Amino acid sequence: MNCVVADAGPLIALAKLELLDLPSRTFGKILVPQTVLDECREQVYSRDTMLIGEAVNNGLFEIRADVPWPEGLREPRLDAGEIAALAMALQSHAGLLIDEARGRREAVKLGIKVVGVCGLLLFAKREGWIAEVMPLLDHLRISGYYISPALRESVLLQSGEA
């Protein structure tokens, strides 16, 4: 994937970890629908919001106007940001950076390649950009970002930290 559309959840998680550069380092072009950016500003603490704003100002993300849901496709029952991200990924023929399980399932049904924060962290460790995954997963959990116990265990096994 050389272009990815980001949903709010992963951006919020990466802000908490101060790793908002990971998506662009990994995929190059990162598109963010306006609705997703608005959700980030509404849902996060001021420090996370500030870091996301700085990332936008530094050109890490390209903010774009929302695109309409494709005609002829049933619109899924997801929040507005996830729908905007799915629609943009479809229109742009891009991958999708998303963590929410229902959104991931819909993306897969639509043929969109997906990656989440945990996948990004594994890739970053393999590339030597981060030393360990476990402290980052622990920080997310403490910060209130949900990662299922099964996913956490799988990520730790894959990273060699189990």
Image (tube, rainbow, N blue to C red):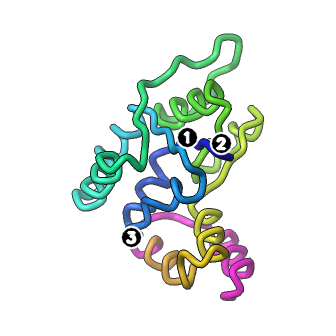
Picture coordinates of residue 107 (x, y %)? Answer: 69, 38
Q: Classify 133 as above or below 114.
A: below
Q: Nearer the viewer, residue 3 or 135?
A: 3
Earlier-in-chain disc, 3 versus 2: 2
Mark 1 or 3: the one toward you: 1
Earlier-in-chain disc, 1 versus 3: 1
Residue in the picture at 68% in, 48% down: 114
Q: Are marks 1 and 2 in contact (CB under 8 Å)?
A: yes
Q: Is residue 154 magenta?
A: yes
Q: Is residue 113 magenta?
A: no
The local crowd at label 2, few if under 14, some if 14 to 19, many if 20 or more residues have their Cα within 10 Å, is many
Q: For mark 2, what is the residue? A: 95
Look at the image and give the residue range highlighted in magenta.
Answer: 141-162
Q: For mark 3, what is the residue? A: 143
Picture coordinates of residue 159 (x, y %)? Answer: 69, 80
Q: For mark 1, what is the residue? A: 5
In the rendered structure, which amino acid carries the disc numbered 2? Gly
Q: Classify 49 as above or below 78.
A: below
